[in-house]
Amino acid sequence: MSATGKCLCGRIHYTLEHPSSALDVCHCKNCQRQSGAAFVPFLAIPMAELHLNGSPKAFMDDDTESGNTVARYFCGDCGSPVYVVVEAAPNTAYVAVGTLDDTHDLTPKCHGWTASKQGWVHIADGAPQHEFEPHLQPEAAVTDAGTE
Ligand SMILES: [Zn+2]
Ligand SMILES: [Zn+2]
């Protein structure tokens, strides 16, 4: 199975190999500010399974609560956030889920940074909530791949 997505203008489009349907939902202030939305759901995928067409710009967001620099990739033409890479997990792309073509079977896996959640947002999906940083994806399978 694969999934496809694109930015609003379509100059950046992508295919994800073997995507899960489990979302990491980020309520941090920086995601709110960059997206203009109340929160941003992300789908984590190994970098090698993100096949990107087009040339997103990167904003290196180094003023984060976690202390990690977050590379925020976006379309320089239409402004859509496309994916982010967190310094502590350099082999994982967090794809901004609003850019996916088909979102019908997605389910939140966890919510992070709920300390900055907007007051009107009531989380009713039962997924674990982390007031601050959620646990990042284990990357062992990706980082070990080169040594096999
Ligand atoms: Zn675009
Ligand atoms: Zn965030």
Image: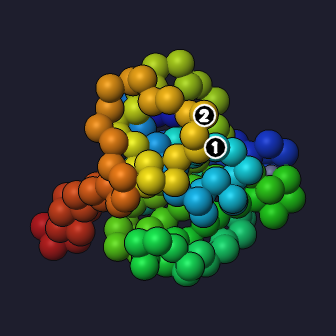
Q: Is residue 21 above or below residue 30?
A: above
Q: Nearer the viewer, residue 120 or 113?
A: 120
As drawn, which residue projects farthest toward the left?
148
Q: Which mark is residue 120?
A: 2
Q: Is residue 99 above or below residue 94?
A: above
Q: Nearer the viewer, residue 79 or 110?
A: 110
**Where is residue 13 shown, x and y percent of the image?**
68, 47
> Mark 1 near ligand 2 (CB under 8 Å)?
no
**Where is residue 37 shown, x and y percent of the image?**
69, 45
Q: Quadrant of the N terminus?
A: top left
Q: Secondary structure at mark 2?
A: loop
**Where is residue 14 shown, x and y percent of the image?**
61, 46
**Where is residue 28 shown, x and y percent of the image?**
52, 57
> Mark 2 near ligand 2 (CB under 8 Å)?
no
Q: Is residue 146 visible?
A: yes
Density class for disc 2 (Cα within 10 Å; few <14, some 14-19, many ≥20) is: few
Q: CA distance from mark 2 to mark 1?
A: 9 Å
Q: Nearer the viewer, mark 2 or mark 1?
A: 2
Amino acid residing under circle 2? Trp
Q: Nearer the viewer, residue 88 or 93?
A: 88
Q: Quadrant of the C terminus?
A: bottom left
**Point 37% across, 58% down: residue:** 132
Q: Which mark is residue 38?
A: 1
Q: Secondary structure at mark 1?
A: loop
Q: Nearer the viewer, residue 146 or 56?
A: 56
Side of 9 relative to 53 (left or right): right
Q: Which mark is residue 72?
A: none
As drawn, which residue projects farthest toward the top?
104
Q: Quadrant of residue 59?
A: bottom right
Amino acid residing under circle 1? Ala
